[in-house]
Image (cartoon, coloured by chain):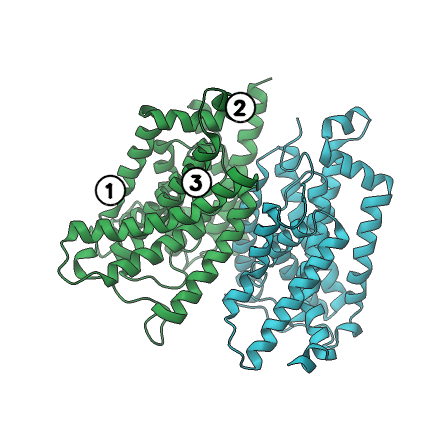
Chain colours: A cyan, B green
């Protein structure tokens, strides 16, 4: 067992599981730092995965698939931003609705595009060796890039100001609405790319393939205390736990998978309760502006 | 009241327009699909029975969300509380001795569900009251945790060999069917109405109800008036969870007679929609539950023309449109 933990195969498996968590968590962090709760990550992952499968199927190109995934995530992000930023709807209600919409719409379109209720036909998929997939390296660069933009760029400063105290930011001449639109769209693009990774990684789209990963990403955002690099680390730890569990299963060691899958959720509750240091959400999180 | 009706009508029109695009993309006529949806739900006795059957749990989950909401809490954990409750109802219903009088059997089985759901609801309530931990995230987390625990417990101990369901409940714990051409409708729909009336009475006519409303509307003022906020929050979440947990009366005691993996799935999340569209008022909630129940059943009715997932899209668009327009209307009204 110990050997497998240090094998390249295990490492690859862990990274493969981590990537969609990380991308969605990075998006979620940006969105939440601007003051917009992102329960809709799940829906963005799902639509991203579907669009990626669609793009890759018709062009036989992983690259086009990834771009289509980003496009799908952007589209969902735009709808979400329209409802919560433009119309100031309750962000939690809207997020839940977006996830329901993504679930129904992808199944409907699956029937329409591929005449199937369960999955798309096989598509061009990522190399089985994670390190050989360019998309993996894109994801690796994105984590420090998001950190740099959020913490050191003027845009990042404005975004954080908008999330902490929108009225003050507005007084200083920042357009709260525009910054939040940008944040939600970026979150959509990142989660869409995460969805693309899911579909391209498993060689096709399967109905409901996001399987709660958006919510796990949301927990990574909280565990990371709304900081991109820490959220990445949280995603990695979830990836590790899941890969470990899968290996235990193949080795026939009896740890119930249901209990291991609970782990991120239990940890998040503990973190929220304040047992792992102080964790404070952005000041204006969840509050519509004006 | 007029404004509320206007919002729902606008939302329905937006949803029908979005649905029409999908129907046309599938090469069918929207008029025919919507006509068929109505004809096979409100147009015949089987369809109507199915609508009642699907609306019943939505009344419970909608009331659960609305109750918490009126105390200023957002209970997204209804899905998990409902599942734990239905599981408990099925286990108690199956373990009672044969020949238990039906009043005792049904009360015990539903009571077990309410207690289980209530206990699960009390956790995020307590964490909120004691540590200030946000109940939204905690209830989402508990949905997953409860789902995993129920599956694990079921697979390890309770599911019938080689199956994904528990043993059937005893004869006298079963809630009689309403018939209606073989539909799943059963007498538990009257329990839903009683629950709605109970919630109304509680908030409008009892002292505790007024206290809880005060906590929801202005916690500071409530505290100044001597109301113990923390305790109200914990108990309100427990009451909300109990309403959600009682839902097993419908699909466990009234229809399947056992708990099955995935039973009632989505009804908890739909409860958020029902509370939203029903404006958190018991009468509105019953109406909204009938609307969403009609759509759920309508999906099966139109499945031969278009994929039944069409109605999932309709439901989601209704929620988005109601959420968006009500915020906008509120803003215009307070200007």
Instruction: Examine the image and state in which quarter residue A183 appears.
Output: top right
> What is the chain letter for disc 1?
B
Query: Which residue occupies the foreground of this view, B318 or A154?
Result: A154
Residue drawn where x is 58% and y is 21% of the image: B332
* Residue B191 place in picture, x, y as percent: 26, 43
Query: Which residue occupies the foreground of this view, B270 or B45?
Result: B270
Query: Which residue occupies the foreground of this view, B216 or A109?
Result: B216
In this view, the mark in front (3 or 1): 3
> What is the chain letter for disc 3?
B
Would you place residue A106 above or below residue B283 in this image?
below
In this view, the mark in front (1 or 2): 2
Of the residues under marks 2 and 3, which one precedes in the sequence? 2
Query: In the picture provided, is B253 more to the left or to the right than B146?
Result: left
- Disc 3 designates what residue? B237
- Crowding at dot 3, Cα within 10 Å, few <14 / some 14-19 / many 20+, comes out as many
Query: In the picture provided, is B248 more to the left or to the right than A40?
Result: left
* Residue B192 place in picture, x, y as percent: 29, 42
Q: CA distance from mark 1 to mark 2?
A: 38 Å
Q: CA distance from mark 2 to mark 3?
A: 19 Å
* Residue B44 place in picture, x, y as percent: 26, 49
Query: Which residue occupies the foreground of this view, B162 or B56?
Result: B162
- On the question of residue A71 being in view, the answer is no
Of the residues under marks 3 and 1, which one precedes in the sequence? 1
Instruction: Examine the image and state in which quarter residue A106 appears.
Output: bottom right
- Disc 1 designates what residue? B190
Task: Say what secondary structure mark 2 lies in.
Answer: helix
- On the question of residue A50 being in view, the answer is yes
- Disc 2 designates what residue? B220
């Amino acid at each position: 067992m110990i050997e497998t933990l240090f094998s390249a195969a295990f490492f690859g498996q862990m990274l493969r599981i981590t990537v969609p968590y990380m991308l969605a968590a990075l998006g979620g962090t940006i969105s939440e730092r601007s003051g917009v709760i992102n329960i809709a990550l799940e829906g963005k992952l799902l639509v991203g995965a579907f669009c990626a499968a669609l793009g890759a199927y018709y062009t036989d190109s992983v690259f086009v698939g990834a771009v289509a995934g980003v496009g799908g995530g952007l589209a969902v992000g735009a709808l979400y931003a329209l409802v919560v930023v433009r119309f100031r709807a309750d962000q939690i209600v809207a997020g839940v609705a977006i996830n329901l919409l993504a679930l129904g719409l992808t199944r409907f379109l699956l029937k329409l595009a591929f005449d199937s209720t369960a999955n798309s036909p096989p598509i061009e998929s990522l190399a089985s060796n994670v390190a050989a997939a360019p998309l993996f390296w894109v994801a690796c660069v994105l984590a420090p890039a998001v950190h740099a933009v959020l913490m050191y760029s003027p845009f990042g400063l404005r975004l954080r100001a908008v999330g902490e105290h929108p009225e003050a930011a507005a007084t200083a001449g920042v357009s709260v609405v525009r910054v939040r639109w940008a944040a939600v769209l970026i979150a959509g693009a990142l989660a869409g790319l995460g969805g693309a990774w899911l579909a391209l990684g498993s060689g096709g789209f399967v109905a409901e393939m996001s399987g709660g990963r958006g919510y796990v990403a949301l927990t990574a955002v909280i565990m990371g205390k709304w900081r991109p690099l820490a959220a990445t680390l949280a995603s990695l730890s979830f990836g590790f736990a899941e890969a470990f569990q899968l290996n235990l299963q193949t080795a026939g060691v009896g740890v119930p998978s249901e209990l291991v899958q609970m782990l991120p959720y239990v940890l998040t509750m503990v973190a929220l309760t304040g047992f792992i240091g102080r964790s404070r959400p952005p000041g204006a999180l969840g509050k519509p502006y004006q | 009241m007029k404004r509320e009706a206007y919002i729902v009508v606008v939302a329905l029109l937006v949803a029908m327009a979005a649905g029409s695009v999908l129907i046309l993309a599938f090469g069918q006529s929207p008029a025919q699909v919507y006509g068929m949806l109505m004809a096979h739900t409100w147009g015949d006795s089987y369809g109507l029975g199915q609508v009642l059957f699907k609306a019943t749990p939505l009344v419970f989950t909608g009331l659960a969300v609305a109750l918490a909401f009126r105390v200023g809490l957002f209970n997204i954990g209804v899905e998990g509380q409902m599942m734990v409750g239905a599981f408990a109802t099925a286990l108690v219903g199956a373990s009672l001795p044969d020949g238990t009088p039906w009043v005792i059997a049904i009360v015990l089985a539903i009571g077990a569900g309410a207690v289980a759901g209530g206990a699960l609801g009390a956790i995020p309530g307590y964490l909120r009251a004691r540590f200030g931990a946000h109940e939204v995230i905690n209830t989402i987390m508990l949905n997953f945790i409860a789902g995993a625990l129920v599956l694990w417990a079921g697979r390890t101990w309770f599911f019938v060999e080689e199956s994904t369901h528990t043993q059937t409940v005893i004869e006298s714990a079963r809630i009689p069917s309403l018939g209606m051409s073989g539909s799943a409708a059963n007498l538990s729909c009257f329990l839903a109405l009683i629950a709605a009336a109970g919630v109304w009475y509680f908030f409008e006519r009892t002292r505790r109800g007024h206290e809880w409303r005060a906590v929801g509307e202005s916690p500071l003022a409530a505290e100044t008036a001597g109301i113990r906020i923390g305790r109200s929050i914990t108990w309100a979440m427990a009451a909300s969870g109990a309403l959600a947990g009682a839902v097993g009366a419908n699909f466990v005691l009234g229809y399947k007679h056992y708990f099955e993996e995935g039973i009632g799935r989505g009804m908890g999340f739909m409860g958020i929609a029902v509370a939203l569209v029903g404006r958190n008022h018991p009468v509105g909630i019953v109406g909204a539950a009938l609307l969403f129940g009609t759509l759920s059943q309508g999906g099966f009715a139109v499945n031969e023309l278009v994929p039944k997932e069409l109605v999932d899209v309709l439901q989601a668009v209704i929620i988005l449109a109601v959420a968006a327009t009500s915020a906008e209307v509120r803003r215009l009204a307070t200007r």
